[in-house]
Image (tube, rainbow, N blue to C red):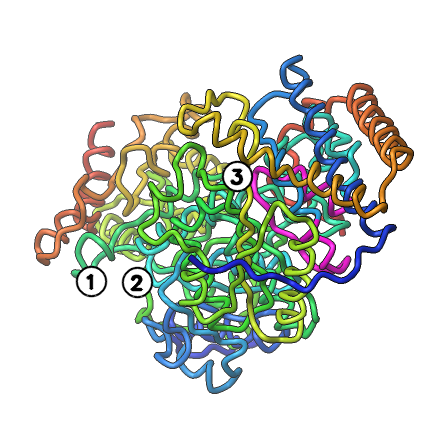
Amino acid sequence: MTVEAKTVRITYREAMRQALRDALHRDPRVFLMGEDVGRYGGCFAVSKGLLEEFGPERIRDTPLSESAFVGAGIGAAMGGMRPIVEIMTVNFSLLALDQIVNNAATMLHMSGGQFNIPLVIRMTTGAGRQLAAQHSHSLEGWYAHIPGIKVLTPATLADARGMLWTALQDPDPVLIFEHGGLYNMEGELAADAGAVDIDTAVVRRAGTDVSLITYGGTLSKVLQAAEELAGTGVSAEVVDLRSLRPLDTATVLASILRTHRAVIIDEGWRSGSISAELSARIMESAFYELDVPVARVCSAEVPMPYAKHMEEAALPQVHTIVETVRQMVGSRG
Amino acid sequence: MSQQVAFQSPPLDRHHSLFLLREMLRIRRFEEKCAELYSATKIRGFLHLYIGEEAVAVGALQALEPDDAIVATYREHGHALARGVSATSIMAEMYGKQEGCSRGRGGSMHLFNAATRFYGGNAIVGGGLPVAVGLALADKLQGRPRVTACFFGEGAVAEGEFHECLNLAALWKLPVLFCCENNLYAMGTALKRSESETDLCLKATSYEMPAWPIDGMDVMACEEATQRAVLTVRSGGGPCFLEFRTYRFRAHSMYDPQLYRDKQEVEQWKTRDPIAVFQARLQELGLLNEEDLKRIEEDITTEVAKAVEFAETGTWEPVEDLTKFVYSEKVQA
């Protein structure tokens, strides 16, 4: 007799909020700060209700001063706190790039190991909501370029619920990228869901003909594509990277050893990107395992347009993924 | 122009006066040796000398307690020495030896020392201010009556981070002491060529914090003003801003032919040399005799010689350790 696991119906937004509440309850050093996280309830309503529950000392509304409040997070972390800094979108994080790249990522090294920065920075990323060229880009791959920080991309309810606590236990800066299109995603989550690891990739769907490697907001599209492909007799394995730095190359390579074909699907641009990095690593380590060259489905190299049909055309879509895989499988004959 | 405040100086105490003179001389002689070692290619990279500005660090740091924090700039040898970071570990750092205060990972611009809460050594102009705000936030949230002293040059006043941080610190009443070392030149750009409003205290008072201009060539004035400001900051009155009016006698770094200022201007400021003037004053008051001076100089010569010897006999970190201090080392369970 099997015991049926208890689950709850929950959205990605609520899972993230539960993670925040849990962290605030468990560790008095944890506090949240950012633009409109308090009174407004968070620009994507993630922190709604937290001000009432935890008060203004721990749920801190900041002025529109990204560099100051991200840097203040760094200083507070060095001063013994466990700050969670929220930046509205990855595009706004560029106003704090100095603090993230020149301070958070370097302090431990510059100080010869004396000062680590246990800081978590959350922000939204990605397109799909007609927010045009200053609210839609996927720059997480850029951040993954930087040694000294970790880059997480929770794509599932379990990861939305579980990555934050693990990130807070990490002695070094961790950036969490939440795709804006995921907040309303609803599903079943184990009632006792908790912390998850933040350094491994996971196979979300097993398959034998091709490895579809992706992360974040594109995962659901890739799973749909895999389902469609299954209907036409192509067995696709889906790998969710989960973390872009560190990059779990071993899990990706293990999948390719099973399928001998790889397609990388990334909402970032392809030039100088995380998909380029991954492609290079596959070539370095599994060149002779590949039946066909690695293929990529990325965003078109334009700033994100506003008009819906143009935005859709710029982004990886289920049909472009399916088409790329069909060509690849067909090319083997 | 904001008027410099004339403080009621207490009668000079011989013991303390000699200490202040000694501290300034330590910095002067140490840096003269650094310049020599730079020419001898023992020290490489950028080397920014503090010569001419010693009264500021020596005076200001007298007002701080051991558990207060200091955030400084890339012209920070003087602050580190005055704070009690050993001359040996600073010199070894400049040599790039692993016995250095940042294990040779930082160099002249990135001196760090956890024991004295010395948080660098920040070489991005304005980049240290957000960190200082965060350190102060951590103290406030944890109810510790500490002060964070943040040093920066007048060049930082043009950075957005300056304005973001003064606003945030004042808004949240954080215990930050903003110490602006106005030496009139941001590298080669004169204050009046870069600021529409050259009265720096006016900028600070517009953020609702007390601000005083101080004669930065007078060590006693620097000490007294800082003590007064620290009292306000520590008692929960929020941040204060001090403008130390000073002058850099040497080039910006070792590569600067100083095309941007007249030799005559430099010579004129040299007549206000903080060490020579203070020394003459003490001699005039009968608080310093030739014997004292000889002893101080001899002690310092010995200290500097020991620092050089320590650096010379220091060891190179093994290249195998190159990737250490990018992330904190995992604690073995």
- Where does label 1 land, which residue? A129
Cβ atoms under marks 3 and 1 closer than 8 Å: no
Q: Position of residue A143 (x, y in %)?
A: 42, 44
Amino acid carrying label 1: it is Arg
Is label 3 on the same chain as label 1?
no
Label 3 and label 1: CA atoms lie apart by 40 Å
* Residue furthest to the bottom: A52
Res. A155 in view: no
Q: Position of residue A103 (x, y in %)?
A: 52, 46
Tell me if residue A330 comes above or below residue B246 in the rendering: above
- Where does label 2 land, which residue? A180
The chain ID associated with circle 2 is A
Q: Nearer the viewer, mark 2 or mark 3?
A: 3
Label 2 and label 3: CA atoms lie apart by 35 Å
Label 2 SS: helix
B122 displayed left or right of A281: right
Label 3 SS: loop
Sequence order check, earlier mark of 2 and 1: 1
Is label 2 on the same chain as label 1?
yes
* Residue furthest to the front: B284
Return the residue nearer the eye: A78 or A136.
Answer: A78
Return the residue nearer the eye: B330 or B250.
Answer: B250
Which residues are the magenta region? B59-84
B59 displayed left or right of B14: left
What residue is at 77 percent from the left and 42 percent from the top? B21
Q: Position of residue B197 (x, y in %)?
A: 34, 54
Amino acid carrying label 2: it is Gly
B10 displayed left or right of B193: right
What residue is at 28 percent from the left and 63 percent from the top? A181
B57 displayed left or right of B151: right
